């Protein structure tokens, strides 16, 4: 199990949600939800954002544990990088 998967499972349990209920709220299958929690799958940015909203998670922590950056953060970093070179 990955850190991200443990984090999601723990957060889901704290909210008193079943895997099936959380999967329904995210519009994914219960099997895909199980794969996320077991560390077999890392969800897309969109799904991570839905997990953050649904489970009321810290967005930065969730993305860090998933080893991803939101595309908007990458775009901002790219702009800053090129501004510095001017």
Image: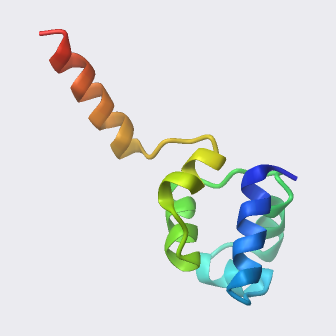
Looking at the image, which is closer to me, 36 or 80?
Answer: 80
As drawn, the residue found furthest toward the left would be: 86
Q: Position of residue 53 (x, y in %)?
A: 49, 74
Q: Position of residue 13 (x, y in %)?
A: 77, 81
Q: Quadrant of residue 31?
A: bottom right
Identify the residue at horizontal 73%, vertical 90% (top origin).
16
Whether residue 81 sits left or right of residue 14 in the image: it is: left
Please say which color scheme the image uses: rainbow
State whether residue 17 is above or below residue 1. Answer: below
Q: Quadrant of the C terminus?
A: top left
**How many numbered dots are placed on residues in this image?**
0
Q: Quadrant of residue 5?
A: bottom right
Q: Position of residue 58 (x, y in %)?
A: 51, 63
Q: Position of residue 22 (x, y in %)?
A: 68, 81
Identify the residue at horizontal 82%, vertical 52% (top origin).
39
Whether residue 71 sits left or right of residue 16 in the image: it is: left
Identify the residue at horizontal 62%, vertical 40% (top origin).
67
Looking at the image, which is closer to me, 40 or 54?
Answer: 54
State whether residue 85 is above or below residue 37. Answer: above
Identify the residue at horizontal 77%, vertical 65% (top origin).
32
Whether residue 55 sits left or right of residue 42 in the image: it is: left
As drawn, the residue found furthest toward the top would be: 85
């Amino acid at each position: 199990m990955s850190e991200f998967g443990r984090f999601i499972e723990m957060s889901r349990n704290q909210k008193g949600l079943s895997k099936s209920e959380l999967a329904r709220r995210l519009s994914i299958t219960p099997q895909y939800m199980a794969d996320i929690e077991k560390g077999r799958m890392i969800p897309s940015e969109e799904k991570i954002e839905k997990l953050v909203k649904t489970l009321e998670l810290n967005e930065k922590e969730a993305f860090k544990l998933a080893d991803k950056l939101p595309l908007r953060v990458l775009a901002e970093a790219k702009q800053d990088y090129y501004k510095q070179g001017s």
